[in-house]
Amino acid sequence: MATTSVPGDIDPFLREGFDHHRRELTGYCYRMLGSPSEADDAVQDTLLKAWQSYDRFEGRSSLRTWLYRIAHNVCMDMHRSPQRRARPMEMGPSTRVDDVVLGEWREETLFVQPVRDEEVLDLGGDPADVATARESIRLAFVAALQHLPAKQRSALILCDVLRWPAADVAVLLETTVASINSALQRARATLEQRRDEPLDTRLDPAHQELLARYVDAFERYDIPAVVALMREDAVLSMPPWDTWLAGRDEVGAWMLGPGIACKGSALLPIDVNGTAGFAAYKPGDDGRRHPWGIQVIEVAGGRIVGHHNFIGPDLFAHFGLPDHLPGRGAVDTHP
């Protein structure tokens, strides 16, 4: 969906209210749609529709509720496709390195996409509240939300994530409190079946030490050291390919095999999907390092359990990252 141009003469009250709620609206739309670019489009379209219908806003609900109702309807219009976004681990069994055939990239619309924390979360609040909020944008949680029917998904996001009272959600969705409570019960039961293991908190100094060791090992391309930081059942994924690998030995074999082209890469730390992430820049023949992929590193029990790589330079612009890094020229990509 293309971003819609919004007129500059929007009523100041509407503009101020919209700007105040923009981040949380973006977070709502991202959890609904599973894509930050689609969430941006939805929020932009929400403002346009609010501007076009502002003369009909009678104040019977709060401006916040009214904007959310518009955003919800925009998300519904954007979510007509029967194909839900998912992670590669939900698309089929894992593949052994010896059997991998990557082929062409799959459509971006098939995959849950990563998002910057600051785009959808207020990171300036109480650290405990921020940590809880980060749980609600984990890749696994956002992917699980896509299994819910639209009404259940919206009710759960509003009530359990954003902490709206059920009565307010009923007003927003134009239904009854009993209907919202029923939708919540079914949604929670579905998510319980798809619950992923909790990840380590980023407030733990040991977590930061692990990440520092990972960056050092990866940038030196010391793959035995990288693998030593992983749990035995760690997984690696590479959207927009739907291939994924299971087990640290397979991950190590990949990095020293087909993935050896990443040797010499530089990593920039980013906050992504409530956990640690890195923008990976591969060396090129022109002496610079170029955007390659966004790494989402998931840690549980003091070990890396997920190494998810979102391949392609387009995400770098969305994350506000540089289009290249200085380098030392081309590197030998042979082990």
Image (tube, helix red, strand yellow):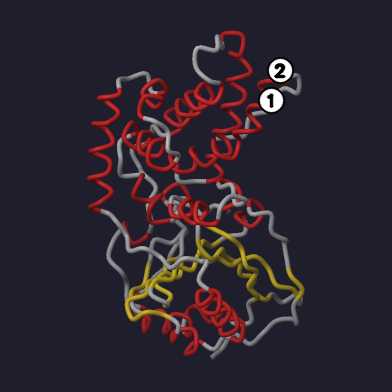
Mark 1 in CB contact with mark 2 (< 8 angstroms): yes
Which residue, given by chain and number where applicable, does mark 1 sit on? 15
Q: Residues within 10 Å of mark 1 (few under 14, many from 20)?
A: some
- Residue 81: x, y in percent? 38, 36
Identified at 57% across, 65% down, the residue is 293
Seen at 35% across and 42% down, the residue is: 83
Indicate whether 9 appears above or below 269. Answer: above
Quadrant where the C terminus sits is bottom right
Specify the amino acid type for callout 1.
Arg
Residue 325: quadrant of the picture: bottom right
Residue 277 rendering spot, x and y as whole percentages: 55, 65
Residue 137 location (% of width, % of height): 46, 51
Disc marking residue 144: none
Of residues 121 and 217, which is closer to you in this image?
121
> Which residue was labeled with disc 2?
11
What is the quadrant of residue 4 in the picture?
top right
